[in-house]
Amino acid sequence: MFIEKDINGFKFRYEDEILYKKCRKSGVWKNCKLLIPHPTGYLMIGCYKDNKLYSYSYHRIVYKMFNESFDFNNRNLIIDHKDRNKLNNSISNLKLVTKKQNNQNTDAYGVCFNKCKRMKKNPWIAHWCQDGKQKSKYFATEPEAKKYRDEKVKELYYLGDRDD
């Protein structure tokens, strides 16, 4: 599959799950997959225009290539990586979500250990957000807490199956 689009005045091409950008001076298509990830873990593409550097997220460009109505410049529109791998920017791995859905679908938060002595029996806490309120439940083991939280999140914010 081959798609070519002009996004914010820059030419991009998506072919065989690889994004290319057209160099303004030489006219050569450069492979954007060869980029070094930003400290946040996302691939960023630098584009120069009128001696000014513009930086774009690789995954947002790929999503825009396939979704014409997507407002590329609206930062409130979040593109989620279904498998949670920030380097997997295949269009089949990207999905438009709300900030709330994106915050719920993370491995980074939601389960913690409580050192309090009175919580000796059930020291693991699963946290989630439901109807705008913080909820929690206590468990004896970390796997139990993670499983329960994942089930609650899937029930409330199902975004499709994810590969763990």
Image (spheres, grey):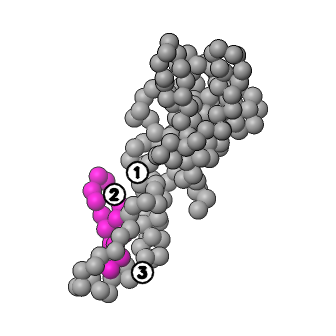
- How many other residues sit within 10 Å of disc 1, few (<14), some (14-19) or many (≥20)? some
Callout 2 secondary element: strand
- How many other residues sit within 10 Å of disc 2, few (<14), some (14-19) or many (≥20)? some
Q: Is residue 105 magenta?
A: no
Q: Disc 1 vs disc 2: which is toward the camera? A: 1
Q: Which mark is residue 103?
A: 1
Label 1 with label 2: CB-CB less than 8 Å: yes
The amino acid sitting under disc 3 is: Thr
Q: Which mark is residue 141?
A: 3
Please give the range of residues in magenta.
Answer: 123-137
Find the distance from the CA under tag 3 to the CA under tag 1: 24 Å
Residue 31, by quadrant, is top right
Relative to 70, is 97 above or below? below
x, y (%) of residue 93?
61, 46
The amino acid sitting under disc 1 is: Asn
- Left or right of 116? Residue 91 is right
Which secondary structure dominates the residues rendered in magenta?
strand
Which residue: 55% across, 48% down? Answer: 86
Q: Quadrant of the C terminus?
A: bottom right
Which residue: 38% across, 83% down? Answer: 140
Relative to 18, is 139 above or below? below
Residue identifier under label 2: 129
Q: Quadrant of the N terminus?
A: top right
- Looking at marks 3 and 1 on the same chain, the residue that comes earlier in the sequence is marked by 1
Relative to 4, is 116 above or below? below
x, y (%) of residue 62?
61, 33
